Image (cartoon, coloured by chain):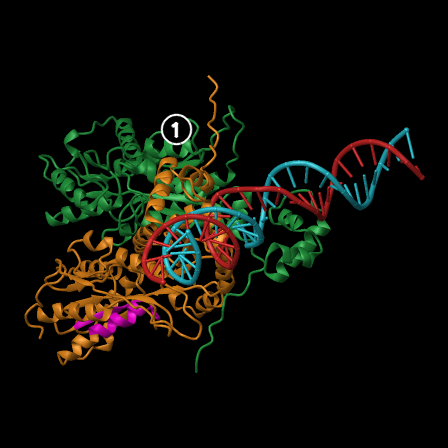
Chain colours: A green, B orange, C red, D cyan
Amino acid sequence: MPSRSTPVRESTTIERVAEQAGVSAKTVSRVINSEPGVRAETRERVMAAIERLDYQPNLAARGLAGARSFLIGLFYDKPGDYLSEFQTGAVQRCRESNLHLMVEPLEAANPDLARAVSTLIRQLRLEGVILLPPLSDLPAVHSALEHAGIPAVDIAPRQRRAAAPSVDTDDRAAARQLTLELLGRGHRRIAFMLGRAGHRATEQRYLGFTDAMQAHGLTVDPQLVQSGNFEFADGLECARRILGAAERPSAIFASNDDMAAAAVCAARQIGLALPEQLSITGFDDAPVATMIWPQLTTVRQPVRAIGRIAADLIIQHKPHRRGWPQPVPRPHLDLEVIVRGSIAPAPPGKT
Amino acid sequence: MPSRSTPVRESTTIERVAEQAGVSAKTVSRVINSEPGVRAETRERVMAAIERLDYQPNLAARGLAGARSFLIGLFYDKPGDYLSEFQTGAVQRCRESNLHLMVEPLEAANPDLARAVSTLIRQLRLEGVILLPPLSDLPAVHSALEHAGIPAVDIAPRQRRAAAPSVDTDDRAAARQLTLELLGRGHRRIAFMLGRAGHRATEQRYLGFTDAMQAHGLTVDPQLVQSGNFEFADGLECARRILGAAERPSAIFASNDDMAAAAVCAARQIGLALPEQLSITGFDDAPVATMIWPQLTTVRQPVRAIGRIAADLIIQHKPHRRGWPQPVPRPHLDLEVIVRGSIAPAPPGKT
DNA sequence: CGGTCGATTGACAGCGTTGACAATTCCACT
DNA sequence: AGTGGAATTGTCAACGCTGTCAATCGACCG
């Protein structure tokens, strides 16, 4: 029984819709793009025709004719859970405006980054680009984009650029609040595990921590501040150093959950009872936060929401009149401290 | 100091390149598309011109004229680490052929899935689609794609479709091997935590497990087989049921690392010493596998490689003469068992 | 009732590239 | 030098849509 393969059927063009609706192609185009100046009755007739023929405008043709692309780029360096959540949120927003998201991994360390970026944007004529950290901190990327006149939004950039939109969360405030949870439980000697140098998150979280400490008149023992680069393996080293300190802290504030998980392991290995003998906090509410015991007290980032907003910023972006910088939107999202089992009152005796 | 905004410079067109090289636009086009029938010397001249002008062909125009899109779709349901690794691999392969990857989250449960898919593919004119599970098992998606004549590759589909390419890993063999690791350590009473019903991985991993058990003349106690849906929370329940059994097993084979992590937690909570009193294995080598203690013995999936291959299958795909199904490629990737601290010899006494 | 002006709509020429096919060039061989 | 055929290159018209600008329509005014 030879299978007849069904060939691709011709797709409906704008012309066919125009015919159906008894108008010109241009008018159909107007309706598609929700341009003003189409009589309501006409618009309806056209929409009905579109519906009836199940018409889908051809992106390439629209792009070519209209000098746009309906494409937004999402540039990232490291894959991971964060990325996938983020992009899901961004795509959601894109769909509402009939745009599409093009994901492009890029190596931050690549010396030829600028050219890679430039190639991408010129080939695709991206309408905007979302930069995930650490790409959001690379001048090479920024200048390539600026040179091409393509709007970019920086996600959690270390320092905001003058005329560039960005999306941030108030890591500092959340870190402060998280530290307060520890202080409130009587902890005084608290260690801190830093993230990767140069990341906004690294700085802000540490600042929030010191804010809270200072507010309580406490100083931070430099021996208890170690860098873990946001990674488990490094975190393990770092936790060991911290726990090996002459005077052991009663709590560890890790800059992310992976490192917090490392602290949990390290503590367990030297036989500490958790959370009784050592409180640990993380950051991000990554999957691992609830997959270990005790579950991590941490800070939830609304990652999808951030993705949505990032896409929204690109979409809302109107090219501004030259010389007149438009106000740069900088949404700030609230983070949520989530208290779980990994923290407990400080053991007595340690004051 | 008013900032003059740099406007978008005109991009080089194929015409300009043709001029530079002293040939017609069509010849430049030939070079770009590496078509045969261009004298070597001419080709070089053109390439030099392209280089000199830093020319980037316009995707939209190429697409419109050539009736293609240079776009491959990656449809997924659940975001996560797997997705982000996979897409990174797929993009790598795409770049080698100047294609781009369009990621599209799709809800498997959406009753209107077929239309969502159809809209996507007609708007974008995708050249192919990669379906991540569980989408790779949905007839609605398949038929929509087939109807549009768009090649699709199924990733780990439950059952292979006749003329459809797919990428699989030999989960069954790996599960068998992993089980052997347990059996080799003297474990006889082994519990199994199933994944989500309907997933290929769920079936194959269980089959591999029973293969090995049977080969050793062991029967599986139905009480020790529980379903955890691939999720930590469910896994926890499920582990508790298993550990609460009249006769406790000496090992648990979890169908993925999240559930294995749950088993670790559950065991710890009832005071079992790990791995001495209970061996646990996972699957996938997810991030969590090395972020808990003891680290999980598991199976590594070459996720990026799978992504690469999936993209490759789309790219290699040549539309076949109607009626003559071409051989369907079905690469099979090897998995790697990784032995870590979560398994140990069975405690004596239990035989 | 002609005129005016804003609201609608349409005609037409591209957008930058490739497909189909024609033209030219190049060579080997008479 | 002439010829045939393959190799190479060019011409021209799409591809499906939108920008520009002209045309038409209608309401309203004097």
Q: Position of residue B264 (x, y in %)?
A: 20, 59
Image position, residue A133 (x, y; %): 32, 39
Is residue B35 shown to the viewer in this render?
A: yes
Rendered image quadrant of residue A225: top left
**Residue at the farthest bottom position:** A1
Q: Does residue A134 appear in this view?
A: no
Q: Please identify the quadrant where the C terminus of chain A is shown.
A: top left
Q: Which residue is mark 1?
A: A161
Q: At 34% from the left edge and 39% from the top edge, which residue is drawn?
A: B48
Quarter where residue B21 is shown:
top left
For badge 1, the amino acid type reads Arg
Going by the picture, which residue comes out furthest to the top? B1
Q: Which residues are magenta?
A: B190-209
Viewer-closest of A296 and B104: B104
User: Which image quarter holds the N terminus of chain A?
Assistant: bottom left
Q: Nearer the viewer, residue B20 or B125?
A: B20
Q: Is residue B339 magenta?
A: no
| Vertical relation: A131 (above or below) B177 | above
For the residue pair B96 and A232, the one nearer the viewer reads as: B96
Is B203 in the magenta?
yes
